[in-house]
Amino acid sequence: MYGSQGYENNSDVIERIVEADKETNFFVANQGAAGLLQTSCFVEAAFTPKKDKQYEMRFTARLGVCNVQVNNLSEVDGKILKEKIDELHPVKKECDK
């Protein structure tokens, strides 16, 4: 993945290969504490990755508020470009059919 080594802010990177042109579901969660306050949050979403594209998912959690952003990655002149995708949508459940 573009930029996975020596990533900004030295944040942890986990790489996954997913099938192109097939809906990909994901669930991310955080549980923590801030002083005496216990916090937890989660995000469940889906999108369909395109063939020959690379993506990054950025998950942030602060005081019980979670955010997920998925960016399409490309490399131009040795620089990694990030373009936010807007195709995230709720996961389709079996009972929703």
Image (cartoon, rainbow, N blue to C red):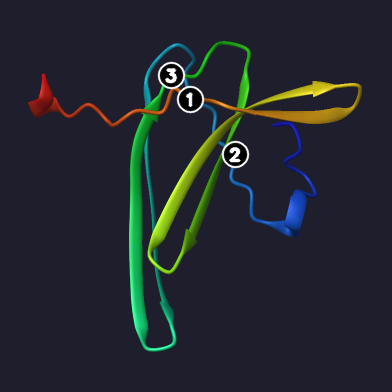
Say the numbered circle drawn on residue 77. none
Which residue occupies the extreme bottom position in the image? 36
Q: Disc 1 versus disc 3: distance between alpha carbons?
A: 11 Å
State the residue position of label 1.
86
SS at badge 1? loop
x and y, in percent, of residue 9 in the image: 74, 57
Q: Disc 1 versus disc 2: distance between alpha carbons?
A: 21 Å
**At 40% from the left edge and 59% from the top edge, which residue is drawn?**
65
Pointer 2 local density, CA inside 10 Å: few below 14, some 14–19, many at least 20: few
SS at badge 2? loop
Task: Tell me the quadrant of the picture where the C terminus can be found.
Answer: top left
Residue 11, located in which quarter of the rendered image? Answer: bottom right
Q: Which of 63 and 96 lies nearest the eye of the viewer?
A: 63
Report whether 35 appears left or right of 91: right
Residue 52, located in which quarter of the rendered image? Answer: top right
Say the numbered circle drawn on residue 48. 3
Position above or below: 71 against 74? below
**At 53% from the left edge and 25% from the top edge, which residue is drawn?**
85
Q: For the residue marked with disc 1, what is the amino acid?
A: Asp
